[in-house]
Amino acid sequence: MTSLLNDLLNSGMTTSLLPLLAQAETDSLPVGDSVNTGSSLISLLIQFVIYCFISYCTQTFLKKLGYEKAWYAWVPIVSTYAILEAGEQQDPLIWTIIAIVPVIGLISLIKLIPAYIKICERLGKPPAILWTFLLCGLGAFIVPVVLAFT
């Protein structure tokens, strides 16, 4: 059992197996940088996959709207501009620049709500879909998926 425990500890799976190893003393377990690096890489990979999926969904609904530069969805700040422009909001460039400014940028996020409402109307979806997802706190992740695939 001791050699199995040592093999597991040396493989870099220390922190994920600690709850399973109730007999092990946590003070004597060698936690190295490899565990932290591994979990950071996994986290980074998950974030990248989510970003790619949301960008793809945004590009898809921008294409449905006939937006000529739907590839803007893949560029982080420019995607905000594309959504504001596709939602027929006034001064999308100014609101996009305001979105970059810390604290004040939160105000510009409020401007995205009427843009998404207009996009829902243009795609023939009831704006109630938007409000449902915004109220549950997952709107930024679910709304592009719903607009792209329904």
Image (cartoon, helix red, strand yellow):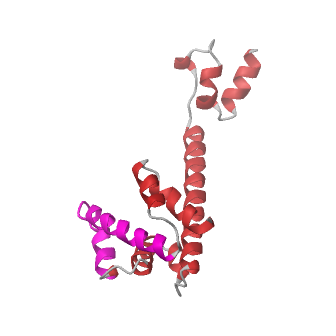
**Which quadrant of the figure contains the N terminus?**
top right
Task: Give x and y (percent) for residue 107.
Answer: 26, 64
Question: Which sits in the foreground, 5 or 114?
Answer: 114
From which residue to which does the magenta span run?
93-122
Q: Is residue 144 left or right of residue 81?
A: right
Task: Give x and y (percent) for residue 25.
Answer: 57, 14
Task: Give x and y (percent) for residue 98.
Answer: 27, 72
Question: Which sits in the foreground, 115 or 96?
Answer: 115
Q: Residue at x 28, y 65 (%)?
A: 105
Q: Residue at x 60, y 48 (%)?
A: 42
Question: Which sits in the foreground, 148 or 104?
Answer: 148
Q: In this picture, is 46 found above or below 35?
A: below
As drawn, which residue projects farthest toward the left?
104
Q: Residue at x 60, y 22 (%)?
A: 19
Q: Which of the 4 image quarters holds residue 12?
A: top right
Based on the picture, tell me whether residue 106 belongs to the magenta stretch. yes
Q: Is residue 128 left or right of residue 56?
A: left
Q: In this picture, is 137 found above or below 91?
A: above
Q: Which of the 4 image quarters holds residue 32?
A: top right
Q: Is residue 17 left or right of residue 2?
A: left
